[in-house]
Image: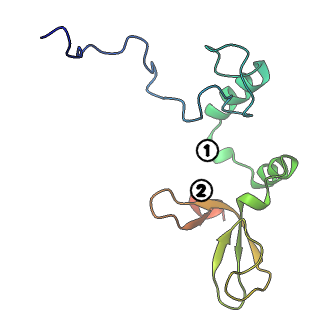
Amino acid sequence: MTPSSPSPRPIRYGSRDGSALTNTPGCCPMCGRTPPSARAVYCDDACKQRAFRLRHQALASVDLGQLRRDLQRRRTLVAHTVYECSTCGEQALGERRCAECGLFMQVLGLGGTCPGCDETILLGELLGLE
């Protein structure tokens, strides 16, 4: 090897458990605030405890009512709700009015977009709850 070429050594302190942070650097992944130091991941003990509980929560114990109340408390319920137009049948995430008809749409439930195909998915269908 030449002195100018990069060394193929592994990173010493990479992700130890195989999971890397997906949030923006310098932000708490739970609330988005700035952590107290550059090495800290979470801003306080409450966010750290909440992240631990979410990681260890069983998937079958998801309560859609509690999730809806939590999203409503954070004022993000509309952004996570799937709506469907009664006349043309088009589905939209977070938009209450149909883009084609201009009419207000009906609520189908909580959901999101598929990362692979960008199609709207209901959370109940994904988890097999409804």
| Mark 2, residue position | 127
Indicate the position of residue 31 as horizontal and vertical percent values. Answer: 75, 34
Residue farthest to the bottom?
87
- In the rendered image, the quadrant that contains the C terminus is bottom right
Question: As displayed, is residue 1 above or below residue 118?
Answer: above
What residue lies at 54% left-to-right and 30% top-to-bottom? 21
- Return the mark for residue 59: 1
Q: Distance from label 1 to label 2 (Cα)?
A: 8 Å
- For residue 117, side relative to residue 95 (left or right): left
- Return the mark for residue 90: none
Question: As displayed, is residue 11 above or below residue 123?
Answer: above
Q: Nearer the viewer, residue 22 or 106?
A: 22
Q: Nearer the viewer, residue 13 or 72?
A: 13
Question: As displayed, is residue 34 above or below residue 36?
Answer: below
- For residue 43, side relative to residue 21 (left or right): right
What residue lies at 70% left-to-right and 33% top-to-bottom? 30
Answer yes or no: do the residues labelled 1 and 2 have beta carbons within 8 Å? yes
- Indicate which disc, 1 or 2, sits on the residue closer to the N terminus: 1
Tag 2's secondary structure?
A: helix
Indicate the position of residue 97 as horizontal and vertical percent values. Answer: 76, 78
- In the rendered image, the quadrant that contains the N terminus is top left
Q: Nearer the viewer, residue 8 or 86?
A: 8
Amino acid under disc 1: Leu
Indicate the position of residue 105 as horizontal and vertical percent values. Answer: 76, 79
What residue lies at 72% left-to-right and 81% top-to-bottom? 98
Indicate the position of residue 63 as horizontal and vertical percent values. Answer: 75, 50
Residue farthest to the right?
73
| Residue 18 location, quadrant | top left
Amino acid under disc 2: Leu
Tag 1's secondary structure?
A: helix
> What count of labels does the image hold?
2
